[in-house]
Amino acid sequence: MMFEIEKTRKTRVKICASLLAADFGNLVDSVQAAEDAGCDEIHFDVMDGNFVPNLSFGPQILETVRNVTKLPIEVHMMVKEPGRFIREFSDAGGTLFTIHYEACTDINKTLDKIAKTGMMAGIALKPETSADSILGLLTEVSRILIMTVEPGLGGQQFLVGMLDKISEIKKLVGKIDGNLDIGVDGGIKIDTAQMATEAGANTLISGTGLFNYPDGLSAAVRLMRQNSSTPA
Ligand code: DX5
Ligand code: ZN
Protein backbone atom coordinates (compact mmCIF):
# COMPACT_ATOMS: atom_id res chain seq x y z
CA MET A 1 0.00 0.00 0.00
CA MET A 2 2.80 2.39 1.00
CA PHE A 3 4.50 1.48 -2.23
CA GLU A 4 1.41 2.44 -4.23
CA ILE A 5 1.31 5.85 -2.55
CA GLU A 6 5.01 6.39 -3.26
CA LYS A 7 4.55 5.41 -6.86
CA THR A 8 1.81 7.90 -7.53
CA ARG A 9 3.27 10.86 -5.63
CA LYS A 10 3.78 13.77 -8.00
CA THR A 11 5.49 17.11 -7.95
CA ARG A 12 3.53 20.16 -9.04
CA VAL A 13 4.94 21.39 -12.34
CA LYS A 14 5.67 25.04 -13.04
CA ILE A 15 3.94 26.40 -16.13
CA CYS A 16 5.67 29.40 -17.69
CA ALA A 17 4.16 31.61 -20.40
CA SER A 18 6.60 32.60 -23.14
CA LEU A 19 5.79 36.12 -24.28
CA LEU A 20 7.19 35.48 -27.73
CA ALA A 21 3.72 34.18 -28.64
CA ALA A 22 1.82 36.99 -26.88
CA ASP A 23 -0.07 39.77 -28.61
CA PHE A 24 2.66 42.46 -28.80
CA GLY A 25 0.05 45.17 -29.39
CA ASN A 26 -1.49 44.27 -26.04
CA LEU A 27 1.46 42.89 -24.16
CA VAL A 28 0.21 44.04 -20.78
CA ASP A 29 -3.12 42.24 -21.33
CA SER A 30 -1.28 39.07 -22.34
CA VAL A 31 0.83 39.13 -19.18
CA GLN A 32 -2.25 39.65 -17.03
CA ALA A 33 -4.10 36.89 -18.87
CA ALA A 34 -1.21 34.50 -18.21
CA GLU A 35 -1.28 35.40 -14.52
CA ASP A 36 -5.09 35.04 -14.33
CA ALA A 37 -4.91 31.66 -16.08
CA GLY A 38 -2.69 30.31 -13.29
CA CYS A 39 0.75 30.44 -14.92
CA ASP A 40 3.58 30.27 -12.40
CA GLU A 41 6.07 32.37 -14.28
CA ILE A 42 6.62 34.65 -17.26
CA HIS A 43 9.29 33.67 -19.79
CA PHE A 44 11.03 36.54 -21.56
CA ASP A 45 13.11 35.62 -24.63
CA VAL A 46 16.00 37.90 -25.53
CA MET A 47 17.62 37.38 -28.96
CA ASP A 48 20.60 39.21 -30.41
CA GLY A 49 20.57 38.40 -34.14
CA ASN A 50 23.92 36.67 -33.64
CA PHE A 51 23.66 33.70 -31.27
CA VAL A 52 20.30 33.16 -32.98
CA PRO A 53 19.22 34.79 -36.26
CA ASN A 54 16.32 36.81 -34.81
CA LEU A 55 15.94 39.86 -32.61
CA SER A 56 13.37 40.24 -29.85
CA PHE A 57 12.95 42.30 -26.68
CA GLY A 58 15.32 44.27 -24.49
CA PRO A 59 15.35 45.56 -20.89
CA GLN A 60 12.91 48.44 -21.49
CA ILE A 61 10.15 46.00 -22.43
CA LEU A 62 11.07 43.83 -19.45
CA GLU A 63 10.50 46.82 -17.19
CA THR A 64 7.01 47.27 -18.64
CA VAL A 65 6.26 43.60 -17.98
CA ARG A 66 7.71 43.79 -14.46
CA ASN A 67 5.40 46.68 -13.63
CA VAL A 68 2.25 44.69 -14.37
CA THR A 69 2.94 41.33 -12.73
CA LYS A 70 4.24 39.92 -9.48
CA LEU A 71 5.09 36.58 -11.10
CA PRO A 72 8.75 35.59 -11.36
CA ILE A 73 10.26 36.39 -14.76
CA GLU A 74 12.84 34.19 -16.43
CA VAL A 75 15.05 36.11 -18.84
CA HIS A 76 16.17 33.59 -21.44
CA MET A 77 19.27 35.09 -23.02
CA MET A 78 19.77 33.82 -26.56
CA VAL A 79 22.68 36.22 -26.77
CA LYS A 80 26.45 35.83 -27.27
CA GLU A 81 28.38 36.75 -24.12
CA PRO A 82 25.23 37.46 -22.07
CA GLY A 83 27.41 38.67 -19.20
CA ARG A 84 27.44 42.07 -20.91
CA PHE A 85 23.78 42.67 -20.05
CA ILE A 86 23.32 41.24 -16.54
CA ARG A 87 23.03 44.59 -14.80
CA GLU A 88 20.43 45.96 -17.27
CA PHE A 89 18.11 42.97 -16.95
CA SER A 90 18.53 42.82 -13.20
CA ASP A 91 17.63 46.50 -12.84
CA ALA A 92 14.65 45.94 -15.15
CA GLY A 93 13.25 43.27 -12.81
CA GLY A 94 14.41 39.83 -13.99
CA THR A 95 14.09 37.07 -11.39
CA LEU A 96 16.05 34.31 -13.08
CA PHE A 97 18.73 35.00 -15.68
CA THR A 98 19.24 32.01 -17.97
CA ILE A 99 22.32 31.96 -20.17
CA HIS A 100 23.26 29.53 -22.92
CA TYR A 101 26.13 27.18 -22.14
CA GLU A 102 27.28 27.62 -25.75
CA ALA A 103 27.27 31.44 -25.62
CA CYS A 104 29.84 32.13 -22.89
CA THR A 105 33.64 32.05 -23.06
CA ASP A 106 33.85 31.99 -19.25
CA ILE A 107 30.63 30.57 -17.85
CA ASN A 108 31.82 30.51 -14.21
CA LYS A 109 32.64 34.18 -14.33
CA THR A 110 29.25 34.93 -15.89
CA LEU A 111 27.46 32.90 -13.18
CA ASP A 112 29.38 34.77 -10.46
CA LYS A 113 28.32 38.06 -11.96
CA ILE A 114 24.66 36.97 -12.01
CA ALA A 115 24.85 35.86 -8.36
CA LYS A 116 26.13 39.31 -7.33
CA THR A 117 22.92 40.94 -8.60
CA GLY A 118 20.67 38.72 -6.49
CA MET A 119 19.03 37.14 -9.54
CA MET A 120 18.91 33.37 -9.74
CA ALA A 121 20.85 31.77 -12.58
CA GLY A 122 19.89 29.18 -15.16
CA ILE A 123 21.81 27.40 -17.91
CA ALA A 124 20.18 26.60 -21.24
CA LEU A 125 21.38 23.86 -23.56
CA LYS A 126 20.92 23.77 -27.32
CA PRO A 127 19.68 20.43 -28.68
CA GLU A 128 23.16 19.31 -29.78
CA THR A 129 24.79 20.05 -26.40
CA SER A 130 25.14 16.94 -24.25
CA ALA A 131 23.75 16.62 -20.73
CA ASP A 132 27.12 15.96 -19.12
CA SER A 133 28.67 19.22 -20.37
CA ILE A 134 27.05 20.97 -17.40
CA LEU A 135 28.04 18.34 -14.82
CA GLY A 136 30.34 20.66 -12.89
CA LEU A 137 27.84 23.52 -12.89
CA LEU A 138 24.78 21.92 -11.36
CA THR A 139 25.44 23.29 -7.88
CA GLU A 140 25.82 26.83 -9.26
CA VAL A 141 22.36 27.25 -10.81
CA SER A 142 18.66 27.10 -10.02
CA ARG A 143 17.51 25.79 -13.39
CA ILE A 144 18.70 23.74 -16.33
CA LEU A 145 16.73 24.72 -19.41
CA ILE A 146 16.70 22.01 -22.05
CA MET A 147 15.89 23.41 -25.47
CA THR A 148 13.46 21.05 -27.13
CA VAL A 149 13.71 22.98 -30.43
CA GLU A 150 16.55 24.96 -32.01
CA PRO A 151 16.49 28.28 -30.12
CA GLY A 152 15.41 31.44 -31.89
CA LEU A 153 11.87 30.90 -33.08
CA GLY A 154 8.45 30.11 -31.61
CA GLY A 155 5.99 27.60 -33.02
CA GLN A 156 8.42 24.80 -33.90
CA GLN A 157 7.91 21.06 -33.43
CA PHE A 158 9.08 19.46 -30.17
CA LEU A 159 12.22 17.34 -30.75
CA VAL A 160 11.30 13.92 -29.36
CA GLY A 161 15.01 13.03 -29.35
CA MET A 162 15.42 15.38 -26.37
CA LEU A 163 13.49 13.06 -24.04
CA ASP A 164 16.61 11.00 -23.33
CA LYS A 165 18.52 14.16 -22.45
CA ILE A 166 15.76 15.19 -20.01
CA SER A 167 16.07 11.78 -18.27
CA GLU A 168 19.86 12.06 -18.16
CA ILE A 169 19.70 15.51 -16.58
CA LYS A 170 17.08 14.27 -14.11
CA LYS A 171 19.51 11.52 -13.07
CA LEU A 172 22.41 13.97 -12.71
CA VAL A 173 20.28 16.34 -10.65
CA GLY A 174 19.16 13.45 -8.44
CA LYS A 175 22.78 12.84 -7.49
CA ILE A 176 23.38 16.31 -6.10
CA ASP A 177 21.96 17.80 -2.98
CA GLY A 178 19.83 20.54 -4.40
CA ASN A 179 16.49 21.56 -5.72
CA LEU A 180 17.04 22.35 -9.36
CA ASP A 181 14.31 23.05 -11.89
CA ILE A 182 14.52 20.97 -15.03
CA GLY A 183 12.90 23.15 -17.67
CA VAL A 184 11.92 22.41 -21.24
CA ASP A 185 11.45 25.11 -23.86
CA GLY A 186 10.16 24.69 -27.41
CA GLY A 187 7.14 22.92 -28.86
CA ILE A 188 5.57 22.39 -25.43
CA LYS A 189 1.87 21.64 -25.83
CA ILE A 190 -0.47 19.45 -23.77
CA ASP A 191 0.80 16.17 -25.27
CA THR A 192 4.51 17.04 -25.33
CA ALA A 193 4.26 18.48 -21.80
CA GLN A 194 3.14 15.04 -20.68
CA MET A 195 6.06 13.35 -22.45
CA ALA A 196 8.59 15.83 -21.05
CA THR A 197 7.35 15.58 -17.47
CA GLU A 198 7.27 11.79 -17.63
CA ALA A 199 10.94 11.98 -18.66
CA GLY A 200 11.74 14.17 -15.63
CA ALA A 201 11.04 17.83 -16.47
CA ASN A 202 9.24 19.87 -13.81
CA THR A 203 9.14 23.27 -15.52
CA LEU A 204 7.27 23.80 -18.78
CA ILE A 205 7.90 26.83 -20.95
CA SER A 206 5.27 27.32 -23.60
CA GLY A 207 4.44 30.10 -26.07
CA THR A 208 2.10 29.05 -28.86
CA GLY A 209 0.91 26.04 -26.83
CA LEU A 210 -0.63 28.47 -24.34
CA PHE A 211 -1.40 31.74 -26.14
CA ASN A 212 -2.69 30.09 -29.34
CA TYR A 213 -4.63 27.26 -27.72
CA PRO A 214 -8.01 27.18 -29.48
CA ASP A 215 -10.03 26.99 -26.23
CA GLY A 216 -8.11 29.80 -24.57
CA LEU A 217 -5.20 30.26 -22.24
CA SER A 218 -6.95 29.11 -19.04
CA ALA A 219 -8.01 25.82 -20.61
CA ALA A 220 -4.48 25.26 -21.91
CA VAL A 221 -2.96 25.83 -18.46
CA ARG A 222 -5.53 23.58 -16.78
CA LEU A 223 -5.07 20.72 -19.25
CA MET A 224 -1.29 21.03 -19.30
CA ARG A 225 -1.25 20.77 -15.52
CA GLN A 226 -3.68 17.84 -15.50
CA ASN A 227 -1.61 15.93 -18.04
CA SER A 228 1.79 16.57 -16.53
CA SER A 229 3.03 14.02 -14.08
CA THR A 230 6.54 14.59 -12.88
CA PRO A 231 7.58 11.68 -10.66
CA ALA A 232 8.60 12.90 -7.19
C1 DX5 B 1 12.43 29.74 -28.67
C2 DX5 B 1 12.13 30.35 -27.33
C3 DX5 B 1 10.88 29.86 -26.73
C4 DX5 B 1 9.65 30.06 -27.58
C5 DX5 B 1 8.89 28.80 -27.48
O1 DX5 B 1 13.74 29.87 -28.99
O2 DX5 B 1 13.17 30.16 -26.42
O3 DX5 B 1 10.68 30.32 -25.40
O4 DX5 B 1 8.85 31.13 -27.22
O5 DX5 B 1 7.85 28.87 -28.36
P1 DX5 B 1 6.85 27.68 -28.57
O6 DX5 B 1 6.30 27.31 -27.23
O7 DX5 B 1 5.82 28.27 -29.48
O8 DX5 B 1 7.61 26.57 -29.20
ZN1 ZN C 1 12.80 30.67 -24.36
Image (tube, grey):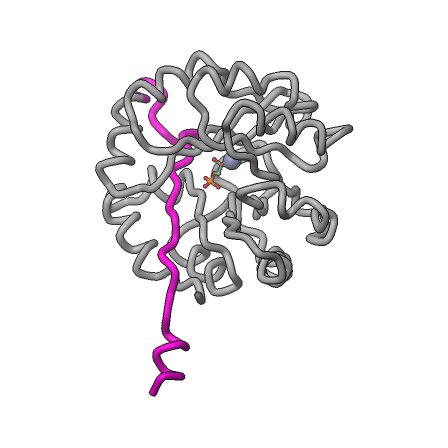
Residue at 68 percent across and 22 percent down: it is: 50
Which residue reaches farthest top?
Answer: 60
* Left or right of residue 160: residue 105: right
In the picture, which quadrant includes the N terminus?
Answer: bottom left
**Residue 126, image x, y percentages:** 66, 42
* In this view, 135 is above or below 108: below
Asked where in the image residue 226 lies, by quadrant, the reply is bottom left
Residue at 71 percent across and 28 percent down: it is: 109
In the picture, which quadrant includes the C terminus?
Answer: bottom left
Asked where in the image residue 54 lies, by quadrant, the reply is top right
Q: Nearer the viewer, residue 27 or 215?
A: 27
Q: Nearer the viewer, residue 145 or 154?
A: 145
* Left or right of residue 149: residue 61: left
* In this view, 22 is above or below 173: above
Residue at 77 percent across and 28 percent down: it is: 105
Which residue reaches farthest bottom?
Answer: 1
* Left or right of residue 159: residue 203: left
Asked where in the image residue 103 lies, by quadrant, the reply is top right
Residue at 38 percent across and 53 percent down: it is: 13
Region of the chain picked out in magenta, as a range: 1-27
Tell me if residue 199 is in the magenta stretch. Answer: no
